[in-house]
């Protein structure tokens, strides 16, 4: 029997997050083995072309706001060559009165200058964005084809080993390394350090080493609508992205004169069914009316032309789980990305690499990472203490109902 290969670093999961982490490590001169249950990269939550990214400007927790700004800048820099910068408009909430001075003060507090975020009344937004609603214009907001980006990150490299069609189901600590086993309980590889960069699959995998993660699936369906030329909707379709209650991409005019418009996404907490649902399309039609303030629009004009269904993975506190698992030295986690996969993947690549290579963190400090932000993402926040004994793990933190961010990836 052939002895399983040993690698210094193994990344489990070849979606946008695992691919980005692997690419960052390769750029730092390390050899990486990436393992995925599928036959190629980005076959699950990262297999679509309709993700959007922008800094978060809501009234959420200060840490979330600071983190998404840092993550957006990292994402913009990493994917600049394939970054589809079309700008994103975030309308004022319907129950809020637009106050320019107050909004500008809030943007200043978030350290978002005018090249990143601009408060606009309805007339200004109509002129600049073609949307007659007050809100905030995010000119650097963009879209990204997650599938193509993931494939590009994992292109052939002399220090990259890809192991496909291999489902890792169990980890075991050996005397000198971690051993990774498949569904047949056969050891696939051993590794000094293991990065878990998968979604819901991380839960049973961590369970194999007596770590309980509070992860929940959230099903999402994104709708691809066709609008005929001359229809009243055609005059209202946006030329920019919109992120509010749901999100949409800019409408695309096709050769026959009709328009294609991507709108999403539905969310079904606790569900992981990938079968398309008519009711999810109906939900997205109603969201479409709200996004462009066209409540009188006839939703029958939004003709179904396709869909994308996926499952997001969320933690109870809305933040991702990124960092070293101190209870199990050599294990690193990058999961619970929810609907901000573009942002959190770019951030995870920097943070995981710094921890894995035991950097001095000077670079992270320059990027804006502070100790409280690193702690806010760390797996240790879900435990009462960093205890090493499996039987003495601390209690889980609250796994309250996740609040899905507005810029959901349609997953």
Image (cartoon, helix red, strand yellow):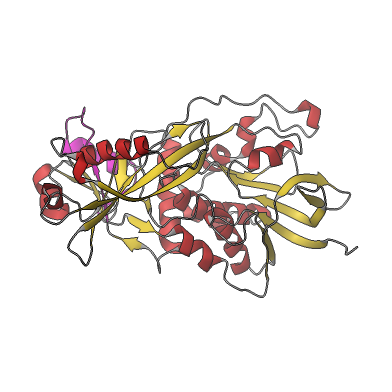
86 to the left or right of 193: left
In the image, what residue occupies the spot 81% across and 62% down?
6
Can you say which quadrant of the picture contains the N terminus? bottom right
Q: Is residue 370 above or below residue 279?
A: below
Q: Is residue 90 magenta?
A: yes
Residue at 16 percent across and 41 percent down: it is 134
**Chain part drawn in magenta:** 87-114
Question: Is 32 drawn above or below residue 69 in the view shown?
Answer: below
Side (left or right) of 114 relative to 206: left
Q: Position of residue 270 (x, y in %)?
A: 52, 31
**Residue drawn at the location 44% of the way across and 57% of the way down:** 75
Quarter residue 287 falls in: top left
Q: Position of residue 312 (x, y in %)?
A: 50, 41
| Of residues 30 and 5, the one drawn nearer to the viewer in this rendering | 5
Up-down: is 300 above or below 363?
Answer: above
- Number of numbered labels in the structure image: 0
Magenta highlight on residue 332: no
Is 90 on the left-hand or right-hand side of 185? left
Where in the figure is residue 164, as x and y percent of width and height?
67, 61
């Amino acid at each position: 029997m052939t002895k399983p290969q040993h690698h210094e670093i193994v990344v489990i999961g070849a979606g946008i997050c695992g691919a980005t982490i692997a690419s960052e490590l390769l750029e730092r001169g390390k050899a990486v083995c990436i393992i995925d249950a599928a036959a190629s990269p980005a076959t699950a939550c990262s297999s679509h072309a309709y993700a959007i990214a922008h800094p978060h400007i809501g009234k959420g927790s200060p840490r979330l706001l600071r983190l998404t700004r840092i993550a957006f800048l990292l994402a913009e820099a990493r994917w600049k060559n394939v970054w589809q910068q079309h700008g994103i408009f975030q309308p004022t909430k319907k129950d809020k009165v637009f106050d320019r001075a107050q909004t500008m003060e809030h943007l200043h507090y978030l350290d978002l200058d005018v090249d990143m975020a601009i408060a606009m009344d309805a007339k200004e937004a109509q002129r600049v964005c073609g949307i007659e609603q007050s809100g905030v214009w995010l000119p650097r907001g963009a879209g990204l084809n997650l599938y193509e980006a993931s494939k590009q990150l994992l292109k052939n490299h002399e220090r990259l080993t890809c192991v496909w069609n291999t489902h890792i189901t169990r980890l075991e600590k050996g005397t000198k390394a971690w051993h990774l086993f498949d569904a047949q309980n056969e050891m696939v590889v051993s590794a000094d350090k293991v990065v878990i960069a998968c979604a819901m699959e991380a839960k049973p995998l961590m369970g194999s080493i007596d770590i309980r993660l509070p992860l929940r699936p959230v099903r999402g369906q994104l709708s691809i609508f066709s609008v005929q030329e001359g229809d009243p909707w055609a005059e209202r379709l946006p030329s920019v992205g919109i992120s509010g209650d749901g999100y949409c991409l800019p409408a695309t005019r096709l050769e026959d004169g009709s328009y294609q418009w991507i709108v999403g996404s539905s969310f079904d907490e606790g569900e992981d069914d990938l079968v398309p649902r008519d009711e999810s399309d109906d939900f997205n039609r109603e969201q479409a009316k709200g996004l462009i303030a066209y409540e009188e629009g006839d939703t029958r004009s939004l003709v179904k032309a396709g869909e994308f269904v996926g499952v997001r993975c969320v933690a109870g506190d809305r933040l991702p789980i990124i960092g070293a698992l101190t209870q199990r030295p050599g294990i690193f986690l990058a999961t619970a990305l929810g609907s901000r996969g573009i942002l959190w993947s770019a951030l995870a690549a920097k943070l995981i690499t710094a921890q894995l290579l035991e950097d001095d963190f000077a670079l992270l400090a320059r990027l804006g990472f502070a100790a409280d932000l690193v702690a806010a993402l760390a797996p240790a926040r879900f435990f009462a203490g960093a205890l090493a004994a499996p039987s003495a793990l601390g209690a889980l933190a609250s796994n309250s109902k996740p609040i899905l961010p507005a810029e959901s990836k349609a997953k």
